[in-house]
Structures are given as structure tokens and as C-alpha cells.
Image (tube, rainbow, N blue to C red):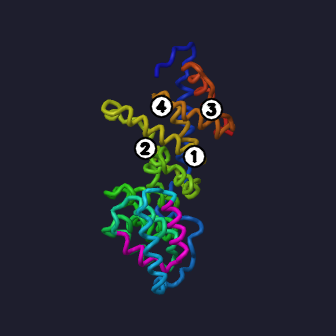
Amino acid sequence: MHHTATTTDPRPARCLTVLLAAALWLSLPAATAQDGPPDTPPELPPVEAPPELPGGRKQALEREIAKLRNDHAPARAKAEATIVGFGRGAIPALLDASTSVHEGQRDSLVNCLARLADLRDRQLVDEQLDSERVVLRRFAARSAGLFGLEPQVARLPPLLTDEDEGVAREAALALVRCGRPEGLPLAATLYSGPDKERVLEVLPGIIGKGRHEPLAQRLKLDPRREQEEPAVAAAERQATVELLAAIGDDAARALLVTALDDKHNVVQRKAIDALRDLLENQGPLQASSIFQQIREVERLKALWQERSRG
């Protein structure tokens, strides 16, 4: 983006605005590995094996589990609801079915297991975090986030690079749910896709927790990537801006101010619209020229500078 010359050099004001944003960002406490959800249970129930289902119920359960291979998502959802109705006694059969390679059934098995398992099953979750089975690693990662037990949460970061994308997704969402910043980069990517609602579900766990450092890193321009894959790099920064807008806390706002200087027009426009919403409760900028967009950038910087001083 090329800015037109003016009689007054705006660069000192821009630098001051960025410095104010950085000062606010640095003044916020960084998230730590010990941060966790506020509702982490102070006392844990005894570990308890699932109850055994009677023979007739077992057969009925097996029929419902077979229905999870249906390629029609609503049909699988109906079967999931029925399976959950069997209670924790369905867990052993679901574990046995976890060798499935049918992707729809895999997702449904994870959904059922995560809905049925509770803190009495925490040892099972411990054991499956490094399972050879994809379904069980996905289940364990999701359950670790739901349980919020620090020893389990601490084992999630390595799963962000799991060879299975589903395991990495569950680990990222679980970490964000538990206020851990390591999951934020992947959460930004997921937010721009079909998993947006799941990201929104876990975001309350990260709001107000630290400075969101991984997202700050994603906003920085990488000269090498700008030469080799500029479109991909810009798309990542755009996704980051969109996630920051959804987070919306002080740290997110400070980072969005820095994104106002992004050289990519769309990324800059996303940052403008996010700050208009967060700072003024205004809708997207209705501007038809790049000059109007530049003026809006300067206006928002001045507004941020004024509020930061106040």
C-alpha cells in the first residue's frame, strides 16, 4: 500500500500509537503454563470403571454404533443421541469400535466418548493421550480440555503437531478452553473454517488471559514468506485479525492497533472494522477509496492514543 505525501509527516504519531499499543500489550500479564479454567474441581471423585450393560442392552448398543458409519450427518447425530442415552456403560463398546477408519464414524465416536466420560474416567483419558488410535487421541485431547486438570492439559502442546489433523484440532481447542496460548495459532486457522462455532465455544477460556503472544507473532511480516508465499502469509494474518476481533479483550485490541499498519489492504481493512466495533460499537467502514481507508486508520490510531492516555 502506498500512502500519499502530506504537508505534515504522520509517521511520529503513528509510531507513538504503535508504542502505546505495545506498552499496553506488554503491561498485561503473560499467560503461564499454570493458568487454567476457574472451575477446575478442587476435589476429584474416585476413579471408577464404567458399569457393565446387560446382554440385551449391549446388542442394542452395537446396532447403534454400527449406524455411526452412515454418511448422512443427521443420521449419525441421531445415533449419537441414542448412544449417549446408554450412559457411561457404553464407553467400553465405543473404545472397541475406535479402530474404525470411517471418518464420519470416527467423529461420532469422539463425540459420544467425550459426552459420556466424566472425572471418574480421568485415568482412561491419561492412558489415551498417547494412544496409537486416532479416535482415542482425539477423545482424550477433547476430554482433557473439558476436565481442565493441569497434568493432562500440560500434555496437550505436543499434540498440536500430531500427524492427525483431528488430534491437533482437539488439542488446540482444549488448550484455548483452558486459557493456554499455545492453541491460539491453530484456533485462528480453525476460526476461518467450518470449526468456527467450536472456536467460539472455547474462547471464553482465553479472554483476559495474558497477551496472546502467539497471535502477536503471526501478525509480524516475514520477509522470506512475503517473497515466497505472500497470499498465504496475508491469509494467516487476516485469520489472526479475525480471531483477535472475536477475543476482544485489551490485549487483542492492542494487537489490532498494530495490524492497522499491515501493508495488505484486506488485513488492514479487517483490523479497521474490528476496532470500529470494539472501540465504538460501529459497523464496518463504508469507504470506496484507499484514501478513505487511510484516513480511517489515522482516526482510529488517534482514538486509541487518546483512550490509552486516559
Identify which residue, 44 or 252, lies in the foreground: 44
For the point 30% across and 68% down, which residue is it?
Answer: 132
Write the start and end of the magenta stretch as one range.
Answer: 75-98
Sequence-first tag of 3 and 2: 2
For the point 69% across and 39% down, which residue is it?
Answer: 310
Residue 171 seen by the camera: no
For the point 56% across and 41% down, which residue is it?
Answer: 254
Q: CA distance from mark 3 to mark 2?
A: 26 Å
Q: Are circles 3 and 2 on residues that touch, CB within 8 Å?
A: no
Q: Does the magenta portion include 83?
A: yes
Sequence-first tag of 2 and 4: 2
The percent position of residue 24, horizontal first and vertical second, equals 57, 44
Observer-side mark, 3 or 2, equals 3
Sequence-first tag of 3 and 4: 4
Sequence-first tag of 1 and 4: 1
Q: Callout 1: helix, strand or loop?
A: helix
Sequence-first tag of 3 and 1: 1
Q: Work out whether 211 lies above or below 42.
A: above
Identify which residue, 188 or 116, lies in the foreground: 116
Q: Callout 3: helix, strand or loop?
A: loop
Q: Amino acid at mark 3?
A: Pro
The residue that mark 4 highlights is 262
The residue that mark 1 highlights is 246
Q: CA distance from mark 1 to mark 2?
A: 18 Å
Observer-side mark, 3 or 4, equals 3
Q: CA distance from mark 1 to mark 4?
A: 19 Å
Observer-side mark, 1 or 4, equals 1
